[in-house]
Image (cartoon, rainbow, N blue to C red):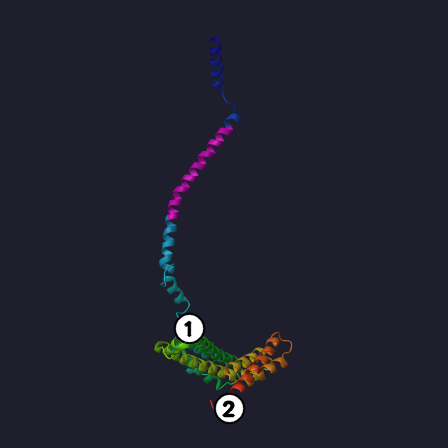
Amino acid sequence: MARAAAKRNRGAGKAARPLTAEQKRPRKQKQEKTLEDELFFSRLRGHAKWAFALLAVVFAGSFVFLGVGSGNAGLGDVFSNVFSGGSAPSIEELQEKVAERPRDKQRLTDLAQALERDGRTEEAISAYRAYLATRPKDEDVLAALALVFQTQAQTAANEVNLAARDLSLAEPGAQFRPGAGALGEALGSFTDPLGQAASTQAQTRYQAALAQYQSANREALGVYRQLSALSPNDSSALLRWAQAAEGSGDLATAIKVYKTFVKRFPTDPLVVDARQKIKDLQDQAKQQTAQQALQEATGG
C-alpha cells in the first residue's frame, strides 16, 4: 500500500512539473499545421463544388455553341463563316467573274474545279478549252485539263471492271453446263431468259464503259502530246502520253513513245518497266494483227 501511494505521488509530481519551451514547441507547430491543412482542404472542397458546377456549364455550353457531338452547325460555325467571309462562291458567281476576265487563270481554275466537284465535267472541260483557245501554251491549264480526262478514264475503267464481273456471273461456268447424253442435249437446248437478259445488259454496259475509257484516253493523249512538246525534259508527261495511247488502243503510238522515253531518259528508274511494257505491247499488237487476218480470211 505504501509503495503504491508513493508511486502515485511520483506520477502526480511528474505531471504537475511544467514543460520547457523546447518541449512545448513541436506539439504547438504540429497542431497549427494540422489546423491549417484542415482549413485549406475545407476551403478547397467548398470551392471545388463551384468549380465543378462552372465546368459542367461550360462543357454543356460548348455542345450548343460549337456544335460538338451533333451533326448540325453550332454558333461557332456561324461565327467562323462570318469572320471568314461566308461560304464559297457559287458556280454562277464564278461564271460571272470569268466573263468579266476570261483570261484570268485563277478565276478560270476556280470555276472549272467547282464544275467538276458538282459533277459537271463536260462544262469544266469546256471552260479549260475556252481559256486555252487564247493561251494554248499554258502548261498549268493543259495539265489540269489532262487530269480531268484521266479522272474520266479511271471512272470508266472501274465501270468496265464491274461490267466484266457481272458478265462473268451472268454466263454459267463450264461446271454448271449440261453434260453429254440425251438429258444433256435436252437441257442444253433450254435458254434461261433471265440469265440471257442479264448477260445482254452486262455486255452493253461493258461495251459502253470501254468506249468511254478509250475516248477519255484519246483526249488525254492529245493533251500530253502538247505538254511533251512544250516540256521535252518532262519524263512524267512523256510516260502519261504513252499510257494514254495504250488506254486508247493506239498500240503503235504507245510503243513509239515508250521507246522515246527509254532513249531520252536512260537512267530513269522506270526504264526497266518501260522496256517490259514495249515487249508486252509488241506481243499484243502481233496477236491483234493475227486475229484481224483470221477474221478477214473467214469473212468474220
Q: Is residue 59 above or below residue 72?
A: above
> Few, some or many C-alpha atoms within 10 Å of disc 2 (few <14, some 14-19, many ≥20)?
few
- Quarter residue 183 falls in: bottom left
Q: Chief secondary structure of the magenta span?
A: helix
Sequence order check: which comes first, mark 2 or mark 1?
1
Q: Which mark, by number, is residue 297?
A: 2
Instruction: Verify whether residue 47 appears in magenta.
Output: yes
Q: Residue at x 37, y 57 (%)?
A: 63
Residue sitting at the far top: 2
Q: Residue at x 43, y 81 (%)?
A: 207
| Range shown magenta | 25-52
> Few, some or many C-alpha atoms within 10 Å of disc 1 (few <14, some 14-19, many ≥20)?
few
Q: CA distance from mark 2 to mark 1?
A: 34 Å
Image coords of residue 202 (percent x, y): 40, 78
Q: Which mark, by number, is residue 176?
A: 1
On screen, residue 227 versus residue 79, left or right, reads right
Q: Amino acid at mark 1?
A: Phe
Q: Secondary structure at mark 1?
A: helix
- Quarter residue 68 falls in: bottom left
**Does residue 93 appear in the picture of this structure?**
no
Residue sitting at the far right: 267
Q: Nearer the viewer, residue 119 or 176?
A: 176
Q: Amino acid at mark 2?
A: Ala
